[in-house]
């Protein structure tokens, strides 16, 4: 798949470099070498992209399309993506350094499924008829219509650009919004490639615009732009907080999917083999670079030592390396800067007295690799048990009672997701009700699915991606009253 124009902006149907003439380097994580140079946009490019999106929204061809036609376009895009699934998996593996196998099994199929799911909603966005007691003695007829909110800025992180891009594009386009997409500077290509497919699918120029560039310059210009009505952001809590502070007074609609520090609770009666395999997956998929990474493994004291040793063994046995080698189980981290950040969390944990049971084995010579790391001897107040690392680093902490497990799990600034491992389903339901998170998985790691809402509370953000709940973020309900 030619990636030549994916490193450019797509504005009003034209691929173009920023007039400012600046470029930034994108490295290939598994080799450390330069993959390409990407156009570094300025607020002037953001202005042009928002203006194109506005024209389509305010009376352009897109604004005249019925929901069924929008659904057909989304389905066509999903079909084209499916036809090019392997090309996309390879492009993602190259730009992210993740094992090709994960792209084939998770990211690409979920992106296709998400687009199809939201295609199905496009002609089902119905209003309501609401009876009232009337107005000043006269009967009324009241109904609502659900209208697209306007131009949506979709700001996407690097850890799953195609999949999270589809989580946002699907509901935004089904609702009838037009969009300006801001890919991460660390993973700019696959999302651009999806926008190219959308043009091929028949989306009119200006409905989907892409602006490449650095967050503080381009992302901020978008989130504070007067022509943007809605912001859907997935990224760090720090940036999410800044967006909320700046966009809140401008009354922009906000969906913020932010960080996490997910607990995985292994109760006394859990089937250990299942729990350990599931916890390792929840911790190490995407090199731990997921918001839902189950990095706090809370274990009943009677099983603590067994779980600690088994997880350390699983970590030590993972094969790191070239994402394109079928034997590779774990790839590289996204950038050297990020790998250093992860290593500094590991160093700080060791200095604080945590016991490192896996993680100091050798890594491949080239590329941004960090070994999967397991810590025991961790107390809940240590930074490694509280801060989001966003890398393959887990802590194992014992508890003595169900109440203590719940208290430990909820003792976090974050509230995105949790897993519970037990054979006692009655207990599982009652503990799930007490966990202050947006998603609880029982005896498995959070199965992401387009039909299930995804998002959290506390420092994990506001609003939901996926499911019919995501559509609400792109729609306004207008009421019309006829006084008879
Ligand atoms: P990040 O916040 O650094 O960047 C995310 C996006 O925001 C990028 O496109 C970036 O260019 C842009 N950006 C940066 N500064 C900006 C600003 N001032 N204004 C507007 N946009 C700006 O996050 P990241 O490092 O790309 O991603 C990792 C983070 O994302 C982690 O904290 C992770 O937990 C979170 N995440 C959350 C979810 C979820 O669903 N809750 C999913 C994936 C990742």
Image (cartoon, rainbow, N blue to C red):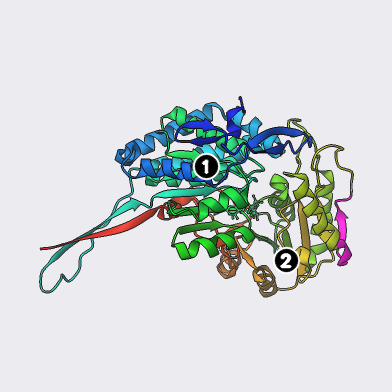
Give the foreground label among 2 and 1: 1
In the picture, the quarter occupied by the C terminus is: bottom left
Is the residue 208 above or below the residue 140 in the image?
A: above
Query: Residue at 57% across / 40% down in the picture?
Result: 162
Q: Position of residue 341 (x, y in %)?
A: 78, 54
Query: Residue at 52% across / 42% down in the picture?
Result: 45
Q: Position of residue 198 (x, y in %)?
A: 47, 33
**Residue 315 is at least partly visible in this image:** yes
- Residue found farthest to the top: 2
- Residue found farthest to the front: 20
Is the residue 79 above or below the residue 252 in the image?
A: above
Query: Residue at 45% across / 45% down in the picture?
Result: 50
What is the distance, in whole Å, between disc 2 and disc 1 at their CAs?
Answer: 39 Å
Is the residue 349 above or below the residue 171 in the image?
A: below
**Lateral position of residue 199 relative to residue 190, left or right:** left
**Lateral position of residue 359 relative to residue 406, left or right:** right
Task: Please name the residue that numbered disc 1 is placed on.
Answer: 45
Q: Residues within 10 Å of mark 1 (few under 14, many from 20)?
A: many
Task: Please name the residue that numbered disc 2 is placed on.
Answer: 386
Q: Which residues are magenta?
A: 350-360
**Lateral position of residue 206 relative to residue 482, left or right:** right
**Of the pair 248 and 65, the residue shown nearer to us:** 248
Is the residue 110 above or below the residue 438 in the image?
A: above
Residue 17, numbered circle: none
356 is within the stretch colored magenta: yes
């Amino acid at each position: 798949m030619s990636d030549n124009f994916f490193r450019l902006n797509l504005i009003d149907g034209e691929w173009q470099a920023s007039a400012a003439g600046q470029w930034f380097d994108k490295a290939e994580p598994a080799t450390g070498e330069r993959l390409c140079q990407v156009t570094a946009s300025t607020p002037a490019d953001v202005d042009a992209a928002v203006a194109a999106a506005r024209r389509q929204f305010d009376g352009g061809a897109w604004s005249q399309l019925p929901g069924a036609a929008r659904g057909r376009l989304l389905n066509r895009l999903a079909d084209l993506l499916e036809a090019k699934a392997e090309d996309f998996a390879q492009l993602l593996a190259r730009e992210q350094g993740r094992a090709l196998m994960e792209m084939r099994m998770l990211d690409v199929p979920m992106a296709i499924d998400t687009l199809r799911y939201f295609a199905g909603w496009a002609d089902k966005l119905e209003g309501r008829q609401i009876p009232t007691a009337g107005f000043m003695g006269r009967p009324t007829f009241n109904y609502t219509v659900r209208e697209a909110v306007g131009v949506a800025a979709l700001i996407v992180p690097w850890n799953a650009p195609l999949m999270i891009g589809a989580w946002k594009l699907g509901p935004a386009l089904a609702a009838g919004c037009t969009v300006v997409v801001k890919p991460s500077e660390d993973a700019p290509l696959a999302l651009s490639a999806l926008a190219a497919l959308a043009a091929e699918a028949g989306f009119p120029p200006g409905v989907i615009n892409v602006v490449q560039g650095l967050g503080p310059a381009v992302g901020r210009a978008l989130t504070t732009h007067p022509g943007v009505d809605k912001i859907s952001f997935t990224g760090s809590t720090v940036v999410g907080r800044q967006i909320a502070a700046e966009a809140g007074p401008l009354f922009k609609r906000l969906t913020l999917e932010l960080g996490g520090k997910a607990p995985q609770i292994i109760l006394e009666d859990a089937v250990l083999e299942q729990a350990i395999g599931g916890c390792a997956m929840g911790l190490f998929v995407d090199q731990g670079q997921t918001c839902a990474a189950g990095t706090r493994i809370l274990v009943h004291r009677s099983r603590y030592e067994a779980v600690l040793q088994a997880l350390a063994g699983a970590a030590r046995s993972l094969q790191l390396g070239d994402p394109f080698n079928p034997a590779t189980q774990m790839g590289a981290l996204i950038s050297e800067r990020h790998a250093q950040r992860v290593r500094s969390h590991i160093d700080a944990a060791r200095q604080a007295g945590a016991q490192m049971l896996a993680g100091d084995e050798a890594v491949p010579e080239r590329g941004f690799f960090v070994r999967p790391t397991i810590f025991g001897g961790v107390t809940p107040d240590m930074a490694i048990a509280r801060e989001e690392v966003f890398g393959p680093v887990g802590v194992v902490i014992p508890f003595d009672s169900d109440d203590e497990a719940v208290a430990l799990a909820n003792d976090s600034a974050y509230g995105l997701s949790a897993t519970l491992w037990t054979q006692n389903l009655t207990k599982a339901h009652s503990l799930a009700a007490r966990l202050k998170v947006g998603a609880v998985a029982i005896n498995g790691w959070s199965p992401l699915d387009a039909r299930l809402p995804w998002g959290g509370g506390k420092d994990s953000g506001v609003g939901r991606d996926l499911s019919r709940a995501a559509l609400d973020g792109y729609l306004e309900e207008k009421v019309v009253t006829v006084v008879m």
